[in-house]
Image (cartoon, helix red, strand yellow):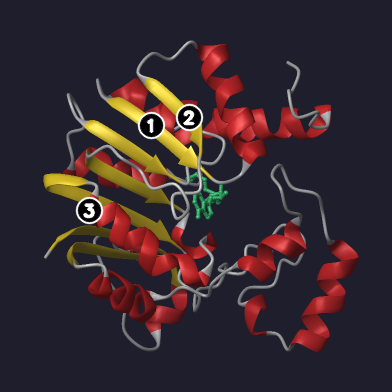
């Protein structure tokens, strides 16, 4: 499969394999998101926005499991390119992918559900309030925004585990972390490399998210804080000190206040 943006063949292959895993397997890194959706929300007949859809695996998963019309929006041209290739390969109807910076070119449609799966921690800090404010305004009455992300206190929040397999590596002093990261830096499928991605993380945690959604006129309807302990005892929400340092993923459903 060839790329219009002249992406390297190896990166296209890697991106397609990653997105296909999210699309076709329940056991991808989005398994908690999928279980949360299946448990609480029925997307059948709904209008859905997958904000920060990346390479589109999760978008296609939703379209495959529910009869819904879904739009995936992302700011990264490489990701949207792969998403379109994946859609073409699997011939999924009812799915559109768009390359769009919504702060500069706001969304016009309204949606029943808006998903941000592993996106919020990547949004540049000055965009967070404008984006959540805009998304709140794009909800149909009774609509839900779903946000999942690894909170900054968590063991893998640095996103560096592939090359620096040290939990909580984000807390290493810069004079230790930066040389290691520069030496082990890798290309990513996308517009930035691993070092660039790390430097762009906004250090999102629950306190910070609460401040943002409050300004955006949203409230929390449901929160699930997942750590490894949940593998042993299901349904626990250990999101207080010191357990909050063990949380690998926050899953939060929001509604308009
Ligand atoms: C880790 S990826 C997650 C992709 C996908 N949601 C998934 O779970 O596989 C984060 C995505 O957020 C996108 N993103 C970051 N800031 C954005 C913004 N301001 N507008 C749209 N997408 C954004 C990035 O380009 C990237 O594709």
Image-based side of 159 in relation to 196, left or right? left
Q: CA distance from mark 3 to mark 1?
A: 17 Å
Given contact means CB atoms under 8 Å apart, are the residues at marks 3 and 1 in contact?
A: no
In the image, which is nearer the foreground, mark 2 or mark 3? 3
Q: Is residue 156 above or below residue 81?
A: below
Given contact means CB atoms under 8 Å apart, are the residues at marks 1 and 2 in contact?
A: yes
Circle 1 SS class: strand
Disc ID at residue 137: 3
Q: Position of residue 29 (x, y in %)?
A: 50, 47
Residue holding disc 2: 97
| Badge 1 density bin: few <14, some 14–19, many ≥20, Cα 10 Å | many
Q: CA distance from mark 1 to mark 2?
A: 6 Å
Q: Residue at x 38, y 13 (%)?
A: 93
Q: Give whichever of 166, 47 is nearer the camera.
A: 47
Residue 122 sits in which quadrant?
bottom right
* Residue 19 in sight from this viewpoint: yes
For this orientation, the residue located farthest to the front is 104
Circle 3 SS class: helix
Quadrant position of the N terminus in the picture: top right
Image-based side of 156 in relation to 205, left or right? right
Q: Position of residue 149 (x, y in %)?
A: 44, 61
| Mark nearer the N terminus (1 vs 2) | 1
Residue holding disc 1: 71
Disc ID at residue 24: none
| Mark nearer the N terminus (3 vs 1) | 1
Q: Residue at x 24, y 61 (%)?
A: 235
| Mark nearer the N terminus (2 vs 3) | 2
For this orientation, the residue located farthest to the top is 91
Q: Residue at x 46, y 65 (%)?
A: 127
């Amino acid at each position: 499969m060839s790329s219009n943006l002249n992406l390297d063949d190896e990166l296209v292959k890697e991106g397609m394999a990653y997105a296909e895993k999210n699309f076709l397997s329940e056991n991808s890194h989005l398994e908690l998101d999928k279980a949360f959706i299946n448990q609480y929300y029925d997307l059948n007949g709904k209008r859905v926005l997958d904000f920060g859809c990346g390479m589109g695996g999760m978008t296609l998963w939703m379209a495959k499991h529910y009869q819904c019309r879904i739009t995936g929006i992302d700011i990264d041209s490489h990701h949207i390119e792969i998403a379109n290739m994946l859609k073409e390969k699997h011939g999924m109807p009812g799915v559109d992918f768009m390359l769009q910076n919504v702060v500069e070119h706001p969304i016009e449609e309204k949606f029943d559900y808006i998903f941000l799966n592993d996106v919020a921690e990547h949004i540049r800090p000055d965009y967070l309030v404008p984006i959540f404010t805009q998304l709140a305004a794009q909800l149909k009455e009774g609509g839900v925004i779903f946000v999942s992300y690894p909170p900054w206190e968590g063991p893998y929040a640095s996103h560096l585990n592939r090359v620096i397999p040290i939990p909580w590596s984000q807390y290493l002093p810069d004079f230790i972390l930066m040389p290691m990261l520069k030496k082990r830096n890798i290309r990513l499928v996308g517009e930035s490399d691993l070092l660039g991605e790390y430097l762009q993380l906004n250090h999102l945690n629950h306190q910070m998210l609460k401040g943002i959604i409050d300004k955006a006129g949203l409230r929390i309807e449901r929160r699930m804080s997942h750590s490894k302990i949940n593998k042993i005892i299901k349904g626990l929400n250990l999101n207080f000190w010191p357990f909050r340092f063990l949380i690998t993923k926050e899953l939060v459903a929001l509604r308009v206040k």
